[in-house]
Structures are given as C-alpha cells and as structure tokens.
Image: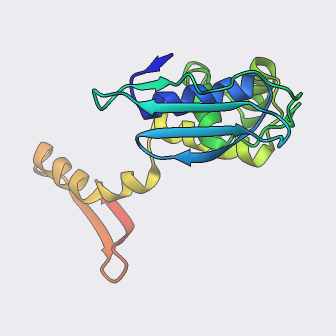
C-alpha cells in the first residue's frame, strides 16, 4: 500500500484503527518512517511505513504484522478520535447543513463509526468546523482599520473611524455613517 505523503499515511492508519475499533501507540513517528503497535501489549499488530526513494511517497513495509490477536481496547470510545479528526470527518455535514449543532455532530460520528466521543471534544470539533467555514472573529477584527479605509475610498463624503487600544493593539470600536 502506498500513500502520497506522510500526512495521508497517518490519516489512513488513524481511520483504519477507529473503524476497526482498536487503539495504537506510536513507537516511531518521524517524517521518513512511522511505526505503530496495538495498545494491547499481548497483541502482535504492528504497522511499519517508510518513505520511498522519491522522497515523498510512503509505503507499507512487508515487516508489518496487520493481524490482530486481540479484540482491541476501544469498543465504543477511542482516544484516537480527537477534535481535529472529528472536524475533518464532519466538515461536509456542517457545510451543507448550517444549522448543525454539536449534538448532531456527535450523533453523526456515532452512526458512521460507532465511536462515542465526549461532548467537549465534539464542541471543539464543531468550533473548528465553524471557523473553517465562517472564519475567525479575531482575524476579522485585525482587518477593521483597512475596512474603514475602504469605506472612505468608496464613499468620499462618509464618516468612518476605527479606534484601537494602542497598548494592547485590540479593537475597541468602529463608527461608520
């Protein structure tokens, strides 16, 4: 099995573990090799992925043992299902249905993967998705002075001011009329 880069390989292995309901830990995780072992010490599952000679693609090596001798520790909870993973998995759902709430995201993850993720993780994932779709408020306030300049250029007789606290460089107010 070959992946285009190290990030695709890591994502595939994480999804594989979550779908097959087991957890792993990283023995080695560098930009040129990945080594994972099953979370159960008695299990012989081991995955070894190494970078090919072209310097980009990653390949699963023959020394990997991909048969599980355990049932896995994660039946309905999985520590591999963190907020970043959940956000990537449900981004399309949140984009298509703007009224999606965190409990809807939690139900979607349970339905698709059979993984029970905590509400705080779901909330963080939902927040990440909303920032990817709508943008960050902090970044919006950074461009407020430029917005007032653009308003004045487009409407020469209008009044447009933006006040900023000079000590903290934080936005304090805007007046447009």
| Residue 85 in the image, given as x and y percentages of width and height | 61, 35
Residue at point 47% right, 39% down? 33
| Residue 163 in the image, given as x and y percentages of width and height | 31, 70
Residue at point 68% right, 25% down? 65
Taking 149 as reference, is 124 left or right? right
The quadrant holding residue 167 is: bottom left
The quadrant holding residue 18 is: top right
Taking 154 as reference, is 3 left or right? right
Q: How is the image coloured?
A: rainbow
Q: Which residue is farthest bottom?
A: 167
Taking 169 as reference, is 39 left or right? right
Q: Is residue 145 visible?
A: yes
* 3 over 119 or under it: above or below: above
| Residue 147 in the image, given as x and y percentages of width and height | 24, 51
The quadrant holding residue 74 is: top right
Residue at point 45% right, 52% down? 137
**44, 149: nearer the viewer:** 44
**97, 89: nearer the viewer:** 89
* 20 over 172 or under it: above or below: above
Q: Which residue is farthest front?
A: 63
**23, 83: nearer the viewer:** 23
* 2 over 129 or under it: above or below: above
Please tell me how many numbered marks the rendered image carries: 0
Taking 10 as reference, is 148 left or right? left
| Residue 124 in the image, given as x and y percentages of width and height | 65, 46
Q: Is residue 126 visible?
A: no
**52, 168: nearer the viewer:** 52
């Amino acid at each position: 099995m070959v992946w285009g880069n190290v990030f695709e390989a890591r994502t595939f292995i994480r999804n594989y573990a979550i779908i097959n309901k087991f957890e792993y830990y990283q023995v080695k995780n560098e930009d040129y090799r990945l080594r994972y072992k099953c979370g159960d010490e008695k299990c012989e599952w081991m995955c070894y992925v190494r970078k090919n000679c072209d310097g980009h693609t990653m390949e699963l090596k023959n020394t990997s043992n991909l048969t599980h001798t355990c049932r896995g520790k994660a039946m309905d909870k999985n520590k591999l299902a963190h907020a970043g993973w959940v956000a990537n998995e449900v981004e399309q759902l949140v984009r298509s249905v703007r009224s999606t709430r965190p409990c809807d995201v939690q139900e979607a993850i349970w339905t698709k993967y059979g993984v029970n993720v905590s509400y705080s993780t779901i909330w963080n994932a939902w927040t990440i998705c909303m920032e990817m779709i709508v943008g960050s408020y902090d970044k919006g306030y950074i461009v407020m002075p430029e917005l007032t300049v653009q308003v004045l250029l487009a409407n020469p007789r209008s009044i447009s001011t933006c006040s900023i606290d000079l000590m903290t460089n934080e936005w304090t107010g805007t007046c447009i009329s």
